[in-house]
Amino acid sequence: MEKATFAGGCFWGMEAAFRRLEGVVETCVGYSGGTTPDPDYHAVCGGTTGHAEAVQVTFDPAIVAYGDLVDYFWEIHDPTTLNRQGPDIGTQYRSAVFFHGTEQETAARASKERLEASGRLTRPPVTEIAPAGPFHMAEDYHQQYFEKRGMAGGCRLR
């Protein structure tokens, strides 16, 4: 099993979307890319920790390739809006791929280049591609939020 970490706005919708993919074994939501040790939801929402709301995906690479996860990531959020997704505004809602190792970095950068060259976007992607640092699990009530509330789930913003 391998891990992948993505940020693309509200982590509830990102998690719900990734949970649907074959080969995804587990997901959890949390905070990544910041400097504050042990952030919590209220601090991250305040925009002072540097963290983004993120989803960490555990996947079986024999079933789904990391590159396919990155390609899917572009489909489930708007990579062209700086520090916002839909009504959510702030650095905590930025678009980011947090890579785990050089193979993931290479695949993420290649995927972003293909997206840029495709002509599909009206504006260039502003997605950050950065090393995965510590991932801080969000509070339990955020995990599988839509499933716990009996909602269909997923805020497909594009």
Image (tube, rainbow, N blue to C red):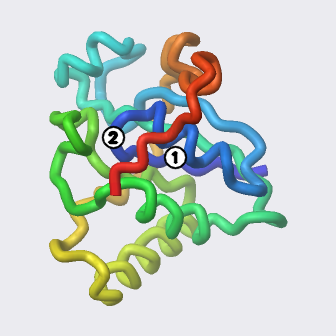
Query: x and y percent of residue 55 in the render?
Result: 51, 38
Query: x and y percent of residue 19 in the render?
Result: 66, 43
Residue for point 44% across, 50% down: 98
Disc 2 marks which amino acid?
A: Gly
Query: x and y percent of residue 148 in the render?
Result: 63, 17
Q: What residue occupies the far right of the structure in this picture?
A: 62
Q: Which residue is mark 1?
A: 5
Residue for point 29% across, 20% down: 44
When the figure is inspected, residue 52 is found, relative to residue 112, above or below; the finding is: above
Tag 1, which secondary structure?
strand
Residue for point 18% across, 24% down: 47
Q: Which residue is mark 2?
A: 9
When the figure is inspected, residue 23 is found, relative to residue 140, above or below; the finding is: below
Dividing the picture into quadrants, the one containing residue 158 is: bottom left
Query: x and y percent of residue 76 in the render?
Result: 44, 55
Residue situated in front as seen by the camera: 38 or 65: 65
